[in-house]
Amino acid sequence: MRADLEIIQQWVRPGHHILDLGCGDGTLLDFLQRERNATGFGLEINPDHITTCMGRGVRVIEQNLDTQGLDNFDDGMFDIVLMTQALQAVRRPDKVIDEMLRVGREGIVTFPNFAHWRLRWGLALSGRMPESDALPYKWYNTPNIRLCTFKDFEALCRQKGIKIKSRRVVDGQHQNSWLARLWPNLLGEIAIYRITRETT
Amino acid sequence: MPDSLPSDSVGLVSPKTIHFDTPLELACGQTLESYDLVVETYGKLNADASNAVLICHALSGHHHAAGYHSLDDRKPGWWDSCIGPGKPIDTNRFFVVSLNNLGGCHGSTGPNSNNPETGKPYGPDFPVVTVADWVASQARLADHLGIQQWAAVVGGSLGGMQALQWSLDYPDRLRHSVVIASTPRLTAQNIAFNEVARQAIISDREFFEGRYYDENLVPKRGLMLARMVGHITYLSDASMGEKFGRELREEAYKFGFDAEFQVESYLRYQGERFSETFDANTYLLMTRALDYFDPAYDFGGDLSKALAPAQCEYLVLSFSTDWRFSPARSEEMVNAMISARKRVSYAEIDAPWGHDAFLIPTPRYTDIFTAYMDRVAREVGA
């Protein structure tokens, strides 16, 4: 099993109502529906992904976060709002995070770390925008328009008074690595954050 | 007609008339003591009767949704693109039921049927039926066919309203409700177009207050105008533009008022053909059923409250250029379903054909519809 699914699953209680922002082909929700009896929806804009979701029984709503936001969801109606590998692709990540924690009690966010040593090294050495397995695009066609580092994300959370309940750092293949745990902002490729505004 | 029937067609089909003797109480307060429903079915009902799909028709539709009545037919049923072996509603897996609704003019009891009390056609005395009345009559049909629960109730436009109404009135009798190019209520603009259509019919001198059958006449001009105005709302500006543009039938303007532009002659042709096959009183009834449909009405306009009893899962589809029932109307419905914590999936399909897109098999529409119905089939073991 993919390490990120394994980690996220541990944070989902049976019957949780979940919203998955940018749910892709529905792999994660399908997994949580079967393993955790979770309910809820994915939001997606890619037509092929939407079709795949519908075929596998994942409830999916065609909705563009950038233009439509989450206005159609009521406050606190979800136990968990997920966003895996999509934060860096929205126009206003800060507003999306606010909305996640308005409609959900808890957010789970994963994104690629732009301060990973290989990206730093690549930029330092070649003077060109870095590319990696997690970020395989050219600067001019990348959907990843809001890249940040783990430190950047944590600073934003502090500034907004958002509590980070857990952080797990994995490598590009979503595997746990002790090196990444040791020095995350340099050695971690992908982080999985669990965030909330609730105080308890 | 093709020389041989296409392999993905349900083939030659014939309608059946089913008579119902149990009185049906209608929303208007009147009661239909007995009535007929004309029905076509495609595919086979499985042993536990779990693979049945109900098709609900739109304004001018009827029971003949797929296949051919004879080898001389020029065209197959109205939704042949979506119903058949290997098509989205796969008749190798589903038992498909399609009927002509009450008040219709294709064989089910309606204004042109004889009123048993007078021995003459009902005409204007046929009660104004609602979407909920149709659903109640369809539930009787399900009883008759031995279907306790539909795998899915499916409809486009006015048919989608019936699919939605089913989920509210008989929550445990359907697993899926597929609502395509529809709306939870008509807008003022929608009602306005219906009113123009009705006035065209009612003001026709040959309408005789709905008793034209007695005069052996048909309010042909009114019906034709009604269809012409309706037809405009089914197409998009872009699709009309592409089909006709400003093309003339002959080379130069003739400085008169005959049909000089291709679009004029197309609309006249559509209107005339329609007026030969459709009943004017039925047209009045169907447009009124559209106007009255508003399940949120009894809940202070709050659709999510109206949805409370629903248990089924919904698929809602809209089309980008549909301005009759625009994607925004579908989204209204979807948002109410989300608020009511119902299971729903939604997609807006990019298609240039306006409201009519729900009848036209574009690749994405077909893919989504097929994927969803495949899942429904697997769920019921079909």
Image (spheres, helix red, strand yellow):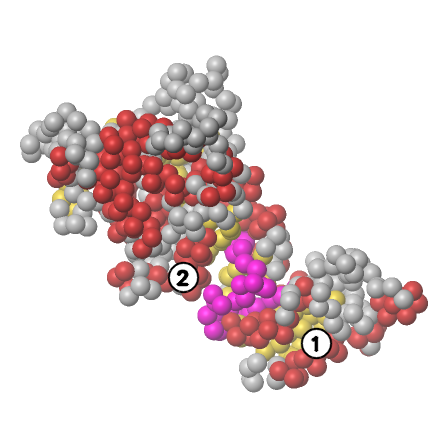
Q: Who's the residue at 22% across and 43% down the image?
A: B199
Residue A153, numbered label: 1
Q: Residue at x 37, y 38 (%)?
A: B231
Nearer to me, B150 or B329: B329
Please report, as a chain letter, where disc 2 is located.
B
Residue B380 appears in the figure: no
The subunit carrying tag 1 is: A
Q: Which residue is mark 2?
A: B336
Amino acid on which disc 2 is placed: Ala
- Judge whether residue A75 is colored magenta: yes
Q: Position of residue B366 (x, y in %)?
A: 53, 39
* Residue at screen point 63% across, 55% down: A24
**In which quadrant of the rendered view does residue B337 lie?**
bottom left
Q: Nearer the viewer, residue B126 or B51?
A: B126
Magenta span covers which residues? A56-84
Q: Are marks 1 and 2 in contact (CB under 8 Å)?
A: no
Picture quarter with the N terminus of chain B: top left
The residue type indicated by label 1 comes to Phe
